[in-house]
Image: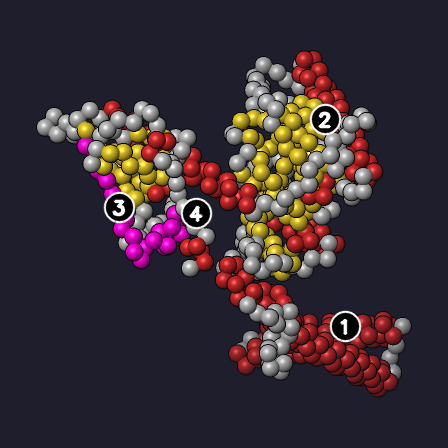
Amino acid sequence: GDEAEKAEELQAYAKTRDYPDSVLPNQIKVDMPNKCVLLPIGGNPVPFHISTIKAAVLTTPDSAMDAATLLRINFYTASMSLGKEASVNITKLVQKYAPYATFIRELTFRSIDGHNLTQAYRMILEMRKRFKQKEVQEQEEATLVKQDKLVRTKNERVPRLSDLTMRPVFAGRKTQGNLEAHQNGLRFISNRGETVEIIYSNIKHAIFQPCESEIMVLIHFHLKNPIMIGKKKQRNLQVFTEVIDASQAVDAGRRNMYDPEEMDDEQRERQLRRKLNDAFKEFCRKVEIVARKNGFSLEFDIPYRDLGFQGNPHKEMVYIMPTLNCLVNLTETPFFVVDLNDVDHVHFERVTFASKAFDIVLVNKDFTKPVWKIDMVPNNDKDSIQDWLTDMEISYTEGPMNLNWKSIMSTIAEDDRFYMNTEEDEVTEKEAGWSFLRLYGQDDDSDGQDSAEEDSDFDDRDDESGEESEESEEEFDEEESEESDFDADEELEEQGMDWEDMERQAIMDDKRKSRRGDDMDDGGGGGGGRNGKRKRTASSNGGRRSSQQRGQQRRRR
């Protein structure tokens, strides 16, 4: 009821004499200035506001038998769905008059000469397009925060950068002009006279990116509240100068590294880079002085190129670099700017040994807003990114799979005890905060720790058993050596021989046994052969024993 009362009544003409002069009977007339279409009904022109027209369909003749052209115009009615294209005001009017008013659903016009109907059809479509664009622009401007009026500097020299290109552009055309710093803000003036004012108090982050590996040197402004540029709201505005033409054709077939012209071009390019970097840096310094002089706090950040990494935040691979307060990519459009103060947690997805890249998800502190995501980050950059997050005191987790963040964020937003480790009964334990994201890793870690403890226990038992076996082996060796020493001493004491006597006795025994073996071989006989074999075995054992005794005697000496 309240919305219906706020509906604005449509009135194209106050009286009939306000109709256009060129209106003819039984002819469709499109009045662009008044946003109205006059349709003949019963020979009389009846005005219809363009916002009441839902669609227009033109049917041309298919054959010579049917040479007429048909134009059908559909209107918004209460008996049918209005759709998303219906304006807010027409929706309120339909709801207001639906209980008692009679609606016209459609009108069809037929003409043998289709020129007038075709022209009317095209004008109706163009007028609907313009009306829709203006309505969207008004809706966007209604949500804008009112900015202060720019106070221009009059009695002092104004810091100025010339021959700049601005992004985003006005109306799809390349926008070039100059940037000036005044008392309470900056002003960009294009060569066609278009102006954009940036108030110091509305600047959230100002970034100066020198030209090192890129083809441009730029100054970027990330705003607290969006401003209108052309017909759209924008929160990011950038001015830059290209060091070399981005579409410059390089004929590599005719040049080489020793070509004097090529070397001169490279030298001139390095000098131009240095000159532009110094000019932009000096302008940033002057802007900071002007802002500080007028009571504003404005500092320009410079990206840390050494901490940068490749990633895909939108639809293409770009080089993303952190600054003191942001994570940015300013070279390619659309711009990627994430305020680190708005990041609550960072999660690494698809972290496995098999994959060559992983994804980064940056969770907003406002759980009702969507997360930022950077895809296809090389695995080689993971350690440096995590070290940087640790320095910035931002928590992070990692997992092997992609998560449904829309459902996760909706669940978290409804949980009042998200950062607490107990449920509402304050007894049942649960994971506190973002710990649930690393449950997979914790299970693996616990299993690994248990297995490591079991392995360590097993190793300890192995060590103990090894030590016991070593001790037993040492005891066995000592006993064996004592027994062998004891046996050798007893034999020596029983025989009462020294080394020379033992050597002499052994030689005599060998000769005696060899003679005995020769006699047995000459005598023959199976039994004698077996006895001879046993005797030779005994003599050989005696020889080995005598050699063992000689070796033990040497060790004792």
State left or right for residue 324 relative to residue 89.
Answer: right
Q: Which mark is residue 104?
A: 3
Mark 2 vs mark 3, foreground winner is 3
Distance from disc 1 to disc 4, alpha carbons, whole Å, reads: 127 Å
Tag 2, which secondary structure?
strand
| Rendered image quadrant of residue 10 | top left
Amino acid tagged 1: Ser
Q: Of callouts 1 and 4, which one flags the residue occurring earlier in the amino acid sequence? A: 4
Q: Which residue is mark 4?
A: 8
Q: Which residue is mark 2?
A: 161
Tag 3, which secondary structure?
loop
Amino acid tagged 3: Ile
State left or right for residue 3 relative to residue 181.
Answer: left
* Residue 199 x, y percent position in the rendering: 70, 39
Amino acid tagged 2: Leu
- The image's colour scheme reads secondary structure
Q: Is residue 233 above or below residue 422?
A: above
Q: Of callouts 4 and 3, which one flags the residue occurring earlier in the amino acid sequence? A: 4
Q: Is residue 365 above or below residue 318?
A: below
Residue at the image position 65 percent from the left and 27 percent from the top = 189
* Residue 119 x, y percent position in the rendering: 30, 26
Q: Of callouts 1 and 2, which one flags the residue occurring earlier in the amino acid sequence? A: 2
> Which quadrant, please, contains the N terminus?
bottom left
* Residue 85 x, y percent position in the rendering: 38, 45
Mark 4 vs mark 2, foreground winner is 4
Residue at the image position 52 percent from the left and 30 percent from the top = 171
